[in-house]
Structure formats: C-alpha cells, structure tokens
Image (cartoon, rainbow, N blue to C red):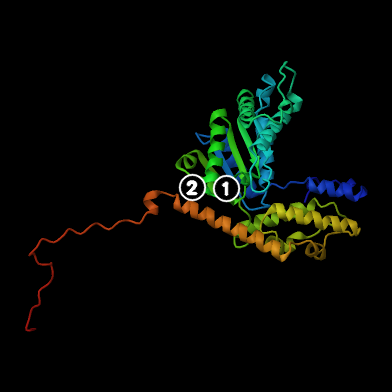
Amino acid sequence: MTQSLRFPQALLDQSAAARLHYFKNITVPHRHLQAALDQLLLNLREPADISIFFIVGPSGVGKTTLRLRAEKILLTESLPELRANPAHIPVAGMEVAASEQGKFSHRDYYMRVLDAVDEVLVAYKSNYGLHYSPDAIHPQRSLAALRRSLEHVLRHRQVKTLMVDEAHHLVMMAGARQMLQQMNWIKSMANITQTTHALFGTYELLNCCRLSGQLSRRSEDIHLPRYQKHSQADVTEFIRVLQTFQRHLPLATEPTLDQWCEYLLEYSVGCIGILKTWLIRALRTTLTENASTITMKHLQQHQLSVARFHQLQEEAESGEQHLINDRTDTGQLSASQPSQKPSTPKRQVGKRNPKRDLVGGQS
C-alpha cells in the first residue's frame, strides 16, 4: 500500500465538512464501468449509422459517472479541433426533468438542451458578433420555433454527441403509441442534426427497441451491470473497490471494509453508486461522533431499509431478465427459430403403408 493511494494526511487536521467533501469527490474506476466506457467511446467515435444508443443499468450502478467520464474524454480528445474552431462543441450533456402530472414537456426539454449547449466550454468561447443566446428565446415562442432553434445550434456548432441523463423520463408515457411517438421524435432530431444521441437510463429504455423496425435498426444497447455475489470475478473486483474506498476514507484508522464484503455487496445490490452513498453517510456519522474509524455499527445504521432494498433488488433482477430475453429473442434468427420437420409426402390411394409383414406360423 503506497502513500500516494491514500488520502492527504493533512485532511485529518481539517474540518469534518472538508473531509466529507474530499471523500464525496472520490471516484473509483472498476471493471464494469471501464468495459461500458470502452464500448460507449468506441461507438460514439464511429457510430456506424447508429443514431441512438441506450445506456441502461439498475439505479445507483454509476450511469451518471459513466456519462461524465465519457464527456471528459471526448472533450479532451477534441482540444486540437477546438483551438482551431472555438465555436465547435463536440459533446454536450443534460438531464431530463421528470414530467409533471404524467405529461412530458417538449418545451422544457428544448430549453434545457439549449442551456446545456450554451454552457459547454465557456472558457473556449469568443465573441464572434453573433447575438444568439438561448436566454433570448421568448418562453412563449412556439414549439416549432424552439425546435428549429435547437436544430440550428446543433448543426452549426457541429455537436457530435448529445448525452441525455435520466432518459427514461422521455418514455414514461401511457402506452406504446405515445412511447413510439417520443422515440420517433428523438430519432428525427438525431437524423436532422447529425447528432448522435446517447440516452442514459434504467431498464425501461429497453422497451424502445421493440417499438418499430426503424428504431431497432438505428439504435443499440450498452449495458452497465451490477456486481453479482455468485460470480467470483465480480466478488474479487468488488473487494478491490472496497479496499480503494477504505484507503481514501479520511479517518485516523483505516477501516477494514473488505472483511464485510458479503454484507456490503448484498445490501448495496451490487451497485457501486449505492455503496458510495452508503459509505458517505457512514463517514458523516463517524465524523460527527469524532470516532477514529467506521465500524459495523455505523454501516448498519445507514443500510437500506428492507422495503427499499427489495424494491431495488426486484427492479434490477427484472431489468436483467428483460435484457436477457431481448438478446435471446433478437439473436441469430436461424438459431432462435425451431427447425421445422420436413413434410411427409401424402400416400397415394390404394398404396400400402411400408411395414414388415408377419412371418411364421402366427395367425
């Protein structure tokens, strides 16, 4: 264990708020996150005629962390191009607000995307004499005018990728017809602007690919899975994540979280985001009590309630089964369809069935 892997020792002399803030900002890369990140970046760099990517996973698995990390990498890769053309925006990200009273607001969506595009790479922007600003859009302008404004910005700023967090709010509609209309709307925006849309959300997004053949052809799923207790590889990786977290907990005595691996894996539902929130709350209590380290008592005090645990567990298992069914049903058609038996030719009238005649003295 090297000193560089631990928290700065000067933190022990700082306030509890400063120590808690330090740990909140710690992000631990792990195997599932890296695999999903590699797959996402590969597809975004060369979409290959795919206009919509659905990045799905259970609640608390780290989808927002995945989005932010992908945005940072794509922005870093685009720095040479940005220096030559400061008006260019390679990637923008935003979060979809939950609909009010079950009705999705396209107006709010357009305004949020416009705000996101306006705020990206502020340090690289210059005054080119252009007077466009999303804030200048009058709130009473028609939806068609707002959409044209957004299309204009995405095209002329050459936004290659729009990353949309909490995208399941886009498809929380009453039925399949409304959901299809929503996805056709997103697909139309992607086609017109030539901007790839990466939609991050829960497993509810998996319902979208079955709505039409067009959507199936122009979309692709990327799965960010949780860690499973029945997989030895997953348990080993989860222990490594625990050891990394415990080294960065700014406490006088380093806790031994890995000894409680089975318990932590179970009650975090295998999701690193849930685990991180759990540890933040336990650290907060530890600092409040002026204790030297996190104990099992602190962890049990902040574990998920039984109802919340079962809700998250059921949603994760249901989504995973949905994903398995989708991949099974949409596999190679020849392999998924049962082979048909060759038809038996009809026997001509008066012709005997082929069989062995009785021989010997039997009557």
Count of picture labels: 2
* Residue corresponding to mark 2: 210
Check disc 2: other Cα within 10 Å, few if <14, some if 14-19, many if 20+. some
- The residue under the point 74% across, 24% down is 124
Q: Is residue 284 left or right of residue 175?
A: right
Of the pair 262 and 334, the residue shown nearer to us: 334
Of the pair 25 and 4, the residue shown nearer to us: 25
Mark yes or no: residue 6 visible.
Answer: no
- Amino acid on which disc 2 is placed: Arg
Q: Is residue 80 left or right of residue 349?
A: right
Q: Position of residue 309 (x, y in %)?
A: 69, 62
Assign a secondary structure to mark 2.
helix
- Amino acid on which disc 1 is placed: Leu
* Residue corresponding to mark 1: 205
Which quadrant of the figure has residue 320?
bottom right
Q: Position of residue 113 (x, y in %)?
A: 67, 34
Mark yes or no: residue 308 visible.
Answer: yes
Which quadrant of the figure has residue 68?
top right
Please tell me whether residue 119 is drawn above or below residue 33 in the rendered image.
above
